[in-house]
Amino acid sequence: MKYFKITFFPLTAGVTVGVIVYGLFDISLDDTKALSMLFIKGIVVGLSVGLILGLLNAYFKIDIFKSRK
């Protein structure tokens, strides 16, 4: 579970914000329907990418915060 959480939370937040910011360049800020669809799309893409990569990290057990001695 530790390996899943290490990957899931940062990736989900980063991908969600990245998709939303990238999508803001393509739409008008006056269109509320497009804005709501953009936020929904960002959340769905972020959660799915975070879930897939979190499960892969739990399987392969890659520790990115490994202390080096």
Image (tube, helix red, strand yellow):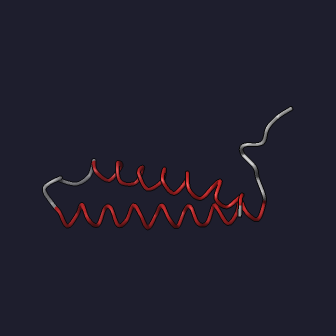
Total numbered labels placed on residues in the image: 0
Q: Quadrant of residue 37?
A: bottom left
Residue 13 point in image, percent of width and height = 48, 53
Residue reaching furthest to the top: 69
**Quadrant of the frame with the C terminus:** top right
The quadrant holding residue 5 is bottom right
Given the current orientation, which residue lies at the most extreme right position?
Answer: 69
Point out residue 49 in the picture as x, y percentages from the top left corner. Answer: 54, 62
Residue in view at x 82 percent, y 34 percent: 68
> Which quadrant does the N terminus fall into?
bottom right
Q: Extreme left residue here? A: 30
**Above/below status of 19 relative to 55:** above
Looking at the image, which residue is at 71% across and 59% down? 2
- Work out whether residue 65 or residue 45 is closer to the camera in this orientation and state it: 65
Q: Is residue 41 left or right of residue 28?
A: right
38 relative to 18, above or below: below
- Residue 11 % position (x, y): 55, 53
Whether residue 48 sits left or right of residue 54 in the image: it is left
Q: Is residue 55 left or right of residue 69?
A: left
Residue at x 78%, y 42% (from the top left corner): 66
Q: Kindly identify the residue that appears in the image at 78 percent across and 60 percent down.
A: 60
Q: Is residue 46 left or right of residue 32?
A: right
Across and down, in percent, residue 12 comes to 51, 57
